[in-house]
Image (cartoon, rainbow, N blue to C red):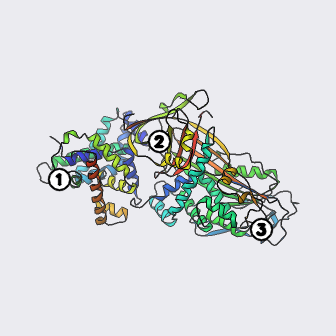
Amino acid sequence: MEDQQIITLYWNRDPEAIRLSGQQYGSVLHRISYNILSSHEDSEECVNDTYQRAWESMPPNRPDSLLAYLGRIVRNLSINLWNKNHAHKRGGHVLLSELSECVSGGPTAEDAVETSFLTEVICRWLSSLPRDDRILFVRRYWFGDDLKTLAAHGRTTPNRLAGRLFRLRQKLKERLEQEGIPL
Amino acid sequence: MKKKKEEKLFDAITNIPDDMIQEAADAGKKRPFLLRHKWPVLAACSLTAVGLLFFFPQPTPSPGGHEPHTAIGVENTDGTSSSAAETDPSSGGPDAPTDGSQESGFMDSPSSGFAGQLADILFPKALAYDDYDAKHQLLESNPVDETFISAVDAFSYETASAILSQSQDNVNYSPISLYYALAVAASGADGETAQELLSLLGVSDSQFLSQQCSNLYRCLYTENEMGSLKIANSLWMDRRYTWKDTFIQNAADHFYSASFSVNFSDGRTGKQMADWISEQTGHTLTPNLSLSREQILSILNTIYFKDQWFTRFDTDKTASASFYPTDAAPVEWDFMNTTQYGSFVRGDTWVRASLQLKNGGSMVFVLPDEGISVRDLVATPEQTASVFQEGETIYGTVTWSIPKFQFSTSLTLGELVQSLGVTSAFRTDADFSGMTDAPAYFSSIRQDTYIGIDENGVEASSFTLINLDGSAMSDNEEEMILNRPFLYGITTPDGSLLFVGICENPAG
C-alpha cells in the first residue's frame, strides 16, 4: 500500500493504519532500533511506542515518506532508552563513539549550534559525496547497520569498509570545521 | 542537561532529508550498493526517442546475384542466442517476383497479426520491481562502457540543444530514439557513410556500437507493476529487393528488431506501420504515414515510457491558476500542488528541481528566471548540459505548482542530422552496401512524440522513422511555480537525460 494511503488512515483515525505500518515497515524499524539497543525486547518496546507516537502526531503531520517519519521516531526513542539504560555505566554507544571522531576535543559552544543548522551542513556534505559513499554513510549512521552486514552487501571486507568509513568521518569533521561549527 | 556533541550529531543525522533515507533504504534492500549503478543512468538515456525514415532511391530492381535471406534471427531474452523465423519465398519475401506483378506486398503472419511479418521482437524477460538481485545480475552480464554512455550523453545534448532552441511551441524530443534508429542504419552502412554516422554517434566501430546498444537495451528494458520502458525497432523492407542476412541478423540480435517484407506501393503498408507504432507505444501514437513509391526501406524505432511519481500528487490540491505563455494571453489551467522536502539547484538565470519516479528515474524541471527566455537555457549543447547537470544541490523545502499537460509533437530531423555532419547518407551515392546491393540513401527522418503528466505520474512515447529511397526564497526553500514556459527532462538519479522538452503552453 502507498505511504499516502496509510497516512490517510492515520488522519481518518483508522487503527488499520498501525497494522499496515507494521506490515510495511515493522522489520526495518525493529532493525534500526536493535542496531542501537542490541536487545530484541527493548527494540520491540520502542517500535510499539513508535506506532503510538505516529498515531498521536498524525494529524496534524502529513509526512511525505512514512519510512523516514517512523524511522526518526524510532531512532529518537531508541537512543533515549539506551541513554536511560546506560546512565549509570561508563563508556558510550558504539555509534556515538564513532561520531565523536567528527568533533574536536576542545572546548565547545554547543548551545550555539542548532541541530537544524547542523543538519543543513550535513545534508550539503552528503549531497556532495559520490552516491555510494552517501548511501554507505546513511546506512551506517541512520539505519545503524553493522560493518559485517554492510560488507556482505557491498561485497567487500569489514576491515576495508571500516577504513572507508573512517575517511568519511574525517571528511565530515573537516567540513564541520570549514563551516565554523564550534563542536 | 546539555547534550553531548556526538549526540547532537546523532540528532542532526536523524533529521536528514527523506529522499536520502529512501535512497539508502532502496539500495539496502538487496542490491549491493557499493558498486556503481549503471542501469539507472542508462535508463535515463532511454527516455529519449528518435524517429528516422530511410528512403532508398527506386532503381530498377537489381538483377539476380543477391543472396536471398532465408532466416531471420531474433534474440532470446538473455541476448545469447537466436531463433530463426523462416521466410516463405512463395509469399512475397525477397525472392518474390521483381516485376511488381503481385498485388499485395504482405505476407500472412499467423503469430503477430501483422501481415508481411518475417520475425517478431522477442522482448527480454521482465524483472520485478524489487528483484534487485536479478537487476544486479543483468547489469553484470550486460556491461555498458562509460565511453558509450558519454557518447550517448553528448549526442543527446547536442541534438536537444539544436531542436529545442529553434522551437516555438511545445516540443518534446527523445534523443535515445534517434540514436537507436541511426545506429541501426549505421550497422548497414560502409565507407564514408558509415564513418559520418559513427562520428555523430560518438563511436569508432560499428560492431562496438551494436554490442553496446544491445547491452544498453537489456539494461533499460522495464516492464513491471510500477511502469514500463520499452524500446522497439523494426525494418520494413521492399519485398522486391534482396536484403543482406548479416544486416537483418545484426538488427535482430543487437537491436531487438522485427522485420517485415512489404510493398510500399500498397496503401495498406502505411496503415500497418502506423498500427505497429501504436501497438508499441501503448496506443499513445497513431501517426498518419504517407509513403513514397521510391521508398524501399523504413527503419522504425519506438520508445514507450511510463512511471509513477514516488509521492503522488493529492488530487484534492489540484487547482486552477493562470499560466503565462511567452507570446499569448494568460490561460487558466489545472495545476498540481504539493510541498516536499527535497533538493534543488539555483543557476545564474534558472532554478532546477526534480521529482522522483518509482523505477529509479526522475523528472527534472528547469524554470528560467522571469524575463529570461526558456530557449536561452538551451542555446548551446554546453548550456543545455549545464542546466540539467551542473550546480550545487541544496536541500530544503520545495513548493511545487506544476500544470498538468499532455501534447504530441512531430519533428523533421533530416536537416539537423545533415547539419551535424551526416551528409553522405543523404546523397544518391550513399554507401549502405551492408544492407543491400541496391542503391539506397536517406530521404527523410521524422520523430513523433507524446508526453503527458498528471497526479499519478508521467507517460511518454516516441517513434523515429528513417526512410530510404532508391538512388537515383530563504536559502533552503524554493518555489517551483511553473506558470510560465519551462524546460523539463526525465533523468536518472545520476542525472542522465531521458526525455527533454519545453512546455510553452499547457493548453497546447
Q: Nearer the viewer, residue B104 or B464?
A: B464
Query: With B137 as the anchor, is B8 left or right in this view?
Result: left
**Mark 1 highlights which residue?**
A92
Instruction: Provide residue B477's location: percent of width, then percent of height.
Output: 39, 36
Disc 1: host chain: A
The reply to the same-chain question for discs 2 and 3 is yes
* SS for callout 1: loop
**Mark 2 highlights which residue?**
B352
* SS for callout 3: loop
Instruction: Residue type at mark 2: give it.
Output: Arg
Residue A115 visible in this rendered orientation of the protein? yes
Task: Please tell me which residue is depicted at 12% across the width and 52% down the height of the picture.
Answer: A89
Query: With B317 as the anchor, is B429 left or right in this view?
Result: right
Q: Quadrant of residue B2?
A: top left
Instruction: Provide residue B422's location: percent of width, then percent of height.
Output: 67, 57
Q: What crowding class fits label 2: few (fewer than 14 Cα within 10 Å), some (14-19), or many (20 or more)?
A: many
Instruction: Provide residue B123's location: percent of width, then percent of height.
Output: 60, 59
Q: Which mark is residue B437?
A: 3
The reply to the same-chain question for discs 1 and 2 is no
How far apart in space, not on screen, are marks 1 and 2 (Cα)? 43 Å
The reply to the same-chain question for discs 1 and 3 is no
Q: What crowding class fits label 1: few (fewer than 14 Cα within 10 Å), some (14-19), or many (20 or more)?
A: some
Instruction: Residue type at mark 3: give it.
Output: Asp
Rendered-image quadrant of the C terminus of chain B: top right
How far apart in space, not on screen, are marks 1 and 3 (Cα)? 79 Å
Rendered position, B210 above or below A65:
below
